[in-house]
Amino acid sequence: MKVKVRKTKSNDFGMIAELIYSTEPFPQVIWGKGKKEQILERILELLEDEDNRYSSKLVMVAELNDRVVGMILLIPYVELRRLSKNTDKILLKYQHKDFRKRFIEYKELSYNLEEAEREELYISNIAVFDEFRGKGIGRALFEKAEEEAYLIGFDKLSLTTKDEKVIKYYISEGFTIEQVMKLEDKNLYRMVKEL
């Protein structure tokens, strides 16, 4: 079974939304109030909008037997802060009125963190459906990210994670922990891979 990694097509959006949704342990904190279906619609809205950090133009998908099984979202450093702020403006309207102030405070804290540096292509999200893990799909997505980084002149990939369970996997893919930052009561690990 050969994994194919390619640019996103509009008929991939539903699968991509599911994958992005799966990356957040508490989706309503990031995506706002609502049931899963409502949040998925919100993510679809973001995928269709070109001026936010979830724009489909930033997404590559992994395909196995003509089915989308994984995705990676790549943001050049120079676009990261602007796209993040645009995303937050969109998502603010979906926050419950009692949580809007908290959402703004959390986002302002996150703006002070350096998710990436100038010479890095930032991996904002990477996800593979559970039933396809362990089949080399993550590796294929990382390889495509490396290709993209070379094409646009970057010599490093970076990502951040709060999930300590995946750090070992990222290290096996050649990433090293560059920095440990605090975001409220959680550690946020900034990891970098030199190309």
Image (cartoon, helix red, strand yellow):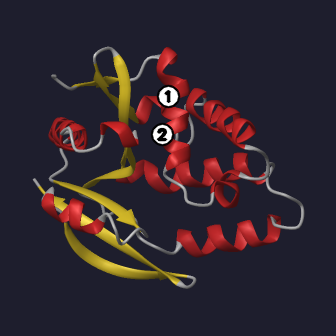
Left or right of residue 11: residue 147: left
**Residue 48 found in image quarter:** top right
**Res 19 label:** 2
* Badge 1 amino acid: Met
Residue 95, x across and y down, in percent: 80, 56
Left or right of residue 150: residue 119: right
Q: Is residue 34 visible?
A: yes
**Res 92 label:** none
What residue is at 76 percent from the left and 44 percent from the top? 35
Residue 45, x across and y down, in percent: 66, 31
Q: Secondary structure at mark 2?
A: helix
Q: Quadrant where the N terminus lies?
A: top left
What residue is at 20 percent from the left and 38 percent from the top? 135
Q: What residue sits right under mark 1 in the picture?
A: 15
Q: Are marks 2 and 1 in contact (CB under 8 Å)?
A: yes
Residue 113, x across and y down, in percent: 46, 73
What residue is at 23 percent from the left and 74 percent from the top? 177
* Badge 2 amino acid: Leu
